[in-house]
Image (cartoon, helix red, strand yellow):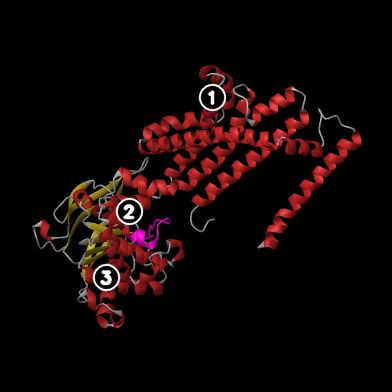
């Protein structure tokens, strides 16, 4: 855990001594997360990987202020997660696209802007930019149920970027997509992340996905959820992550290192990370 | 398309015509007295003869039902929103409203006539409004609670206020349920507005006309008004169904 800076405002996310315990009636409490320390630098792409039940989604939810830690602290751009949430400092994307079925693609993308009471002229301009960015310019007036799963997820990503957040929190955004679509979406996300300059925390259970996209991969173990290793992938700038990278030796090397780190975990968890 | 519509509509239509024919023949052949059962042709003759009065009656009763629907549904939607925002209100009110749904509200009509005056329509509006209120309130409340957790997370992460969540998430999501409530309520409002007339109040409506025709032994005319009531009920049902269809989720209609 690279605790490089003590000045938390200089980091996008700073997590210290985080612990989250879920009480279960009639049974011992579940320790979802324990002793988590993590720093994410501005513009850095960090993946959280680990078997089911390792608390990676819980960690993301805590950063997003969708849940409260039992003990420990989280700073998002030097603020409490609650303050950061109220200041619209981050965007979120989930495994399901979570689009509102009664809104068109454009109006789904506009939702965060409307909630932040951005004036309508600016909203309109921004919708155009975002549709371009995710390659859906022709589909602004379509409804979500008229789009494929991959297109819906692209809308969700465009929506998460609507307010130009400096931090993007993504919980298995491609988990429900087929392998081909998934790879294409990863390439697009690399490009989008590079263009927007946002820091990204990506929850995933796919080793190649983590290797392809991340600057660093945080490997976690279950029950209690702990960080067991942090793999520096360092395959270069986000903008250079194109399809060619998938066949580069550096990519295979990164996959191997993440897999080995995960194998250390597997003793504790019989379920392999790549299942599901 | 047309062939399919024909295939759907033809059998019940034939059955209807066949039944009317049998009815007509039975009354004629068995010499059934008109006060027991008039022939369809006799009823139809009365219907045509008194068409203006029947339409007037239907408009009068329909207006009472409509006022009931507007007042009852508006109140039900507002209070359901309030109840969904303040959980304790929902917990307190839902069982009471559910219990109210089995109370034959029209039984209150005689009491209401004394309360508001026998020459006023107020009692009928109230009966219709209460009968609409119950299904709209319960359905709206159910719809408002249908919002998915993932959508709630999305709104929370985007710092949406309680009102924004209601306005942009729970209310649009509840719309199909509200419409179903209104559809059920509309049918109930017509029935209750009509029955309420049986217990007194001003003349002119269909219900009152049915009772007074029957009281003066003009049974074919009473039946003609009943036919008017049937048509009014069907009209109300079609309006309700149209509202429900308009509000149905995309692609489901």
Residue B69, image x and y in percent?
A: 51, 36
The answer to which of B105 and B55 lies nearer the viewer is: B55
Q: Nearer the viewer, mark 3 or mark 1?
A: 1
Q: Tell me the quarter of the picture where residue B56 sits.
A: top right
Give the residues in magenta: A94-109
Q: Tell me the quarter of the picture where residue A106 sits.
A: bottom left
The answer to which of A113 and A268 lies nearer the viewer is: A113
The secondary element bearing badge 3 is classed as helix
Q: The residue marked by circle 3 belongs to what chain?
A: A
Evaluate if marks 3 and 1 touch, with contact meaning CB atoms under 8 Å apart.
no
Q: Which residue is mark 1?
A: B123
Q: Main secondary structure of the magenta part?
A: loop
Q: Which residue is mark 2?
A: B154
Label 1 Cα neighbours within 10 Å, binned few <14 / some 14-19 / many ≥20: many
Q: Give the residue displayed 51% in from the left and 20% down from the top.
A: B116
Q: Give the residue displayed 63% in from the left and 39% down from the top.
A: B233
Is B49 left, or right, of A92 in this rendering?
right
Whole-number angstrom distance, CA of label 2 to CA of label 3 = 21 Å
Q: Give the residue displayed 74% in from the left and 39% down from the top.
A: B48
Q: Does residue A136 appear in the picture of this structure?
A: no
The secondary element bearing badge 2 is classed as helix
């Amino acid at each position: 855990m690279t605790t490089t800076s003590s000045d938390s405002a200089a980091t996008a996310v700073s997590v210290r001594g985080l612990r989250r315990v879920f009480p279960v009636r009639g049974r011992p409490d579940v320790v979802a997360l324990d002793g988590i320390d993590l720093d994410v630098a501005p513009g850095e792409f960090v993946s959280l990987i680990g078997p089911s039940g390792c608390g990676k989604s819980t960690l993301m939810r805590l950063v997003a202020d969708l849940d409260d830690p039992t003990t420990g602290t989280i700073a998002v751009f030097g603020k409490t997660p609650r303050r950061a949430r109220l200041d619209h400092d981050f965007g979120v994307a989930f495994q399901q696209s979570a689009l509102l079925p009664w809104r068109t693609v454009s109006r789904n993308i506009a939702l965060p802007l409307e909630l932040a009471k951005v004036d309508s002229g600016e909203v309109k301009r921004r919708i155009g930019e975002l549709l371009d960015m995710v390659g859906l310019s022709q589909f602004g007036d379509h409804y979500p149920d008229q789009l494929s799963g991959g297109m819906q997820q692209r809308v969700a990503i465009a929506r998460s970027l609507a307010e130009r957040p400096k931090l993007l929190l993504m919980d298995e955004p491609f988990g429900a997509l087929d392998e081909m679509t998934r790879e294409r979406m990863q390439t697009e996300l690399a490009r989008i992340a590079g263009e927007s300059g946002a820091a990204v925390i990506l929850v995933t259970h796919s080793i190649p996905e983590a290797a392809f996209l991340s600057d660093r991969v945080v490997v976690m173990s279950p029950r209690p959820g702990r960080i067991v290793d942090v793999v520096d992938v360092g395959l270069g700038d986000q903008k250079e992550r194109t399809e060619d990278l998938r066949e580069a030796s550096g990519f295979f090397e990164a996959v191997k290192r993440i897999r080995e780190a995960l194998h250390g975990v597997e003793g504790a968890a019989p379920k392999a990370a790549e299942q599901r | 398309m047309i062939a399919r519509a024909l295939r759907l509509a033809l059998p019940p239509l034939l059955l209807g015509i066949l039944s009317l024919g049998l009815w007509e023949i039975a009354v004629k052949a068995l010499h059934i007295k008109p006060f027991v059962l008039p022939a369809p042709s006799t009823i139809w003759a009365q219907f045509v003869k008194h068409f203006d009065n029947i339409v007037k009656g239907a408009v009068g009763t329909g207006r009472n039902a409509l006022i009931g629907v507007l007042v009852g549904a508006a109140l039900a939607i507002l209070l359901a929103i309030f109840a969904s925002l303040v959980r304790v209100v929902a917990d307190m009110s839902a069982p009471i409203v559910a219990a109210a749904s089995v109370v034959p509200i029209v039984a209150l009509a005689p009491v209401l006539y004394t309360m508001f005056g026998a020459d006023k329509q107020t009692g009928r509006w109230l009966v219709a409004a209460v009968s609409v209120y119950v299904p709209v309130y319960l359905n709206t409340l159910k719809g408002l609670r249908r919002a998915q957790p993932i959508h709630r997370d999305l709104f929370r992460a985007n710092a949406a206020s309680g009102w924004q969540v209601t306005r942009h998430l729970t209310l649009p999501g509840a719309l199909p349920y509200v419409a179903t409530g209104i559809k059920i309520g509309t049918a109930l409002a017509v029935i209750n507005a009509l029955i309420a007339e049986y217990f007194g109040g001003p003349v002119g409506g269909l219900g009152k006309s049915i009772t007074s025709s029957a009281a003066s032994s003009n049974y074919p005319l009473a039946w003609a008004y009943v036919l008017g009531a049937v048509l009014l009920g069907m009209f109300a049902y079609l309006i309700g169904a149209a509202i429900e269809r308009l509000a149905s989720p995309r692609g489901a209609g």
